[in-house]
Amino acid sequence: MPFDVYGFDVAIIILLALVVIVVLSGVKTVPQGYTFTVERFGRYTRTLAPGLNLIVPFVDRIGRKMNMMEQVLDVPSQEVITRDNATVTVDGVTFYQIIDAARAAYEVLGLENAILNLTMTNIRSVMGSMDLDELLSNRDEINAKLLRVVDAAAEPWGLKMTRIEIKDINPPRDLVEAMGRQMKAEREKRASILEAEGERQSEILKAEGEKQGLILQAEGRREAAFRDAEARERSAEAEAKATQMVSEAISTGDVQAINYFVATKYVEALTQMAKSPNQKMLFLPMEATSILGTLGGIGAIARETFGTDAPAGRRAGSVPATGAAPGATPRPGGEGERS
């Protein structure tokens, strides 16, 4: 069956197509990381956020499509004259982010060109106020100062300068060679100073060690002298006590005690004489026989002390015969009868 198309139907179809086109023209999709500005009759009215948005067809239109992500720009190389008249070649990189799409779109013409010129100008200004040594050693300070200055200047454009980095600072070749010689001389100077400082510390430590050694030796001698004096004091006390005991024994009539005391002193004196290195001959006193008799008295004292029976017929206080066997009867008028 033939399909008849009338004029009214065609008009309806065209009208529906126009409606669809109008509706679609009012629907705007903004990708993530971007914002679109809307202009009505050429004047900014609002900003479209990422996602699906509607505008009035034929009245509103998309003005600028702004990238809201952080962006990077390479700063071209340029020559900078430092405060001490050294010419260096400097380049860098800058990072920025649009935080206000409307101001970034309508407050400045040629946004990237404006950022580059602003950064390069401030690089010359900041680095030109410093000496060459400061440029080479204070790069972080330069970056911070540049960021602070450029961020303040770009704030009216709706931008946030997130980072500015100086990549390379290249002095002239002759200046690099002079810096190399200076660095070498400085290192040699530091090496000489460190070597001298090491020798000085070594001598100080050696002297300290000798000092400590002498102190310890003196302390040792003092301790030894103290102990020697204490030993002599104890010996004197013992001698005094022994003398007192002998005196008490003599006062009670014990003649053997004084014989023991005198014999002991004789023996000590003979011992000292025998130990003398220059003494080649030993002279006995005239009373040598008495000494020997005294030794016999010591034997008698020992026998009395340990309970041994004394020789028969010997009176108390007599000197026993020497060289005779224990218990032998002394000869009348012999040496054993001398007192």
Image (cartoon, rainbow, N blue to C red):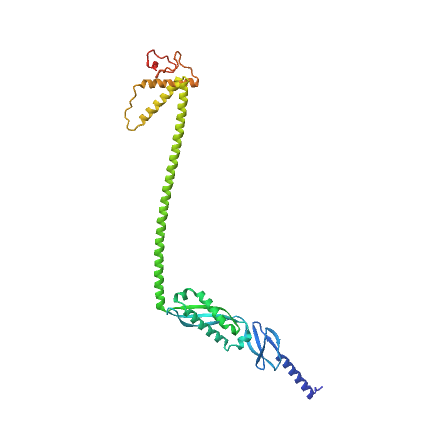
- Quarter where residue 173 is shown: bottom left
The quarter of the rendered structure image containing the C terminus is top left
- Quarter where residue 15 is shown: bottom right
Residue at 45% from the left image edge and 65% from the top image edge: 141
Residue 328 is situated, as x and y percent measured from the top left of the image, at 37, 13
| In this view, 250 is above or below 134 | above
- Farthest bottom residue in view: 7
Side of 248 where 21 appears, left or right: right
Label tally: 0
Residue 338 is situated, as x and y percent measured from the top left of the image, at 34, 14
The quarter of the rendered structure image containing the N terminus is bottom right
- Farthest front residue in view: 251
| In this view, 304 is above or below 85 | above
Is residue 5 visible to us here? no
Residue 302 is situated, as x and y percent measured from the top left of the image, at 41, 19
Is residue 231 visible to us here? yes
Side of 56 where 139 appears, left or right: left
Residue 28 is situated, as x and y percent measured from the top left of the image, at 60, 77
Residue at 61% from the left image edge and 74% from the top image edge: 52
Q: Nearer the viewer, residue 319 or 244?
A: 244
Residue at 56% from the left image edge and 73% from the top image edge: 34
| In this view, 259 is above or below 130 | above
- Quarter where residue 44 is shown: bottom right
Q: Which of 25 and 217 is in front in this view?
A: 217
Side of 65 where 138 appears, left or right: left
